[in-house]
Structure formats: C-alpha cells, structure tokens
Amino acid sequence: MGAMRDIDAYQRAYAASDFEPVQARMRRRMLLELLGRWQPRRVLEIGCGNDALFTDYLHFDRFCVVEPGAAFAEQARARAGIDPRVRVVQSFMEDAAEQLAGESFDCIVLSGLLHEVPEAASLLAAVRALCSADTQVHVNVPNAHSLHRLLALEMGLISDLRQLSDNQRELQQPRTFDSHSLSALCADNGFEVIEQGSYFIKPYTHRQMAQLQDIGLLDERMLDGLYGLARRLPDMGSEIFVNLRRAPPTQEV
C-alpha cells in the first residue's frame, strides 16, 4: 500500500520546501514537550524524516524507528551510531508490523504522516496491532481549519478549507484533516481519543512565511509567540494532534 507513494520524490520535495524546516522544528518542540510529560521508556517512531526523536529525547531503554525513505533511514542509523538501544527499520509500517510483533511499546509516535499515506486505515491497523492496553499513541497532521487556511478562504484564494495546497500536492499529501475527521478516523479504527488540540499558529502560507523570514520580520521571538498563541487560539494551529489509547473491547468496531 505504501509502495504507491514515490518516496524518493517525497524526500527531495521535503528537502526543498522553503518553510518546512521551521514547521518541523515547531512540531519537534511539541513532541519533545509531550515525551517529557509522558516519559516513555520504549518508543516507536514511525516516519522519522530528517531528524529522529532519539537524538533529543534521551530517556529511553529502547527506541525503534520505522522509516521507508532510504536517505532518512540511513541518516537515522548514522546518528544512532553503535547505540544498542536504537533499531532502525527501513520499511513501510504496514510491512514492518510483522517484524515488530513480539515487541511492546510505551509510546508510538505517528508524526506528520497519516495525511500522506494512501490507506490511512491500514496504517492505523498496523499501529493498533502493536498496542497494549497501556500504550500511548500520538498522531499529528496539518489542520484544515488553521488560521492561514481560514484567511485564504476569506480572501477567495480557496473555495473549501479541505482544498489541497500546492505544497501538499508537491509532498504527495492526498487528504486534509480537521479535528473532527481525525478523531473520527482514529475512533473508527479501534482507538480512544484521550487528548486533542493544535499547535503553532501560522498566519500565512509556507512561501509567505519564508519571505517574512528573509526580510527579517519573522524572527525567533515572533516564532515563539506564534507557538504560544495556540493556547489562545486552540483550534487554529497549523497542525492538529490526537493522543490515543487502544479502545477497550466494548468500544471496538
């Protein structure tokens, strides 16, 4: 299923995206805050991209990365070095699930991925198969109701909040979620939502945000402010998240 995506093209598009490195930094900030709160010892990260979390989150006994991109996986292996606690599997998660069937995890991180895969339900099924009753699962995706999309709608630049942007098409992202549709998809696939929200207010498109950086208007202080602003505009962050547990048997579908 994952093989339908052109992973090499995705890696090139990701590397060339003008504001994506900053967006990724804000996403990582949120993830490290979450891991600091959860303190998991056994972690599975699905789709590590340029920078696997184990380079900054150090309080683990075992850390497994599943990454389909050859360049991303090789980079993760290089950064792991000879650390015996880290395992990197170059594979799509649906294919790797059988290899990991005997493992148990306190935390599974599915960051910036669910909106990109052709079969989101299949990916969630593979994740659920690795969950115990105590496993915490984190999922984040771009927000269809983010401030910059709402502004684009009011300006007449888009006719629908779910309309794919040029950046999304370049990154092979076939769908856009809002909080309701993301929670519903996870619930329909055997998960219970225990927490949800959004983070990092992004008023403009990636290209416009990069231009503001280039002229010196968008500095670190303003980025910090936009990150904190999501507390006051909790539904309008550039990306949304759900934290999940495997639904108990009475809630399974």
Image: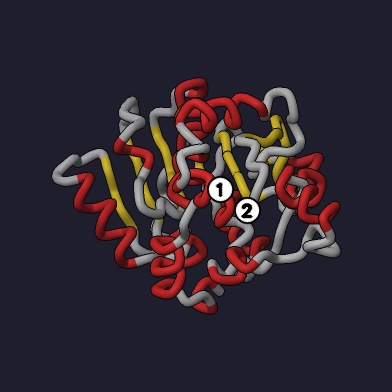
Under circle 2, the secondary element is loop
Question: Residue 140 sits in which quadrant?
Answer: top right
The amino acid beneath tag 2 is Thr
Residue for point 74% across, 38% down: 236
Residue pictured at 76% horizontal, 36% vertical = 235
Q: Which mark is residue 168?
A: none
Q: Are marks 2 and 1 in contact (CB under 8 Å)?
A: yes
Could one spot residue 123 in this view of the protein?
yes
Q: Is 97 placed left or right of 244 in the picture?
A: left
Q: Residue at x 80, y 63 (%)?
A: 158
Quarter of the figure that contains the N terminus:
bottom right
Q: Position of residue 64 (x, y in %)?
A: 36, 46
Q: For the residue carrying disc 2, how many other residues have a C-alpha within 10 Å: few (<14), some (14-19), or many (20+)?
A: some
Q: Position of residue 80 (x, y in %)?
A: 22, 45
Residue nearer the viewer, 213 or 162: 213
Within 10 Å of disc 1 (Cα), the crowding (few <14, some 14-19, many 20+) is some
Whole-percent x and y of residue 8?
A: 39, 74
Residue plotted at (77% across, 55% down): 152
Q: Is residue 245 visible?
A: no
Residue 68: name its quadrant. Answer: bottom left
Residue 54, relative to residue 95: is it above or below? Answer: above
* Numbered circle sitting on residue 209: 1
The outermost residue toward the top is 37
Q: Is residue 226 above or below residue 121?
A: above
Question: Mark 2 and mark 1: span between their CA atoms?
Answer: 6 Å
Asked if residue 34 is positioned above or below residue 159 in the image, the reply reads above
| Frontmost residue, 152 versus 91 | 152
Determine which residue is flagged by label 2. 205
Question: Is 114 placed above or below 139 here?
Answer: below
The amino acid beneath tag 1 is Met
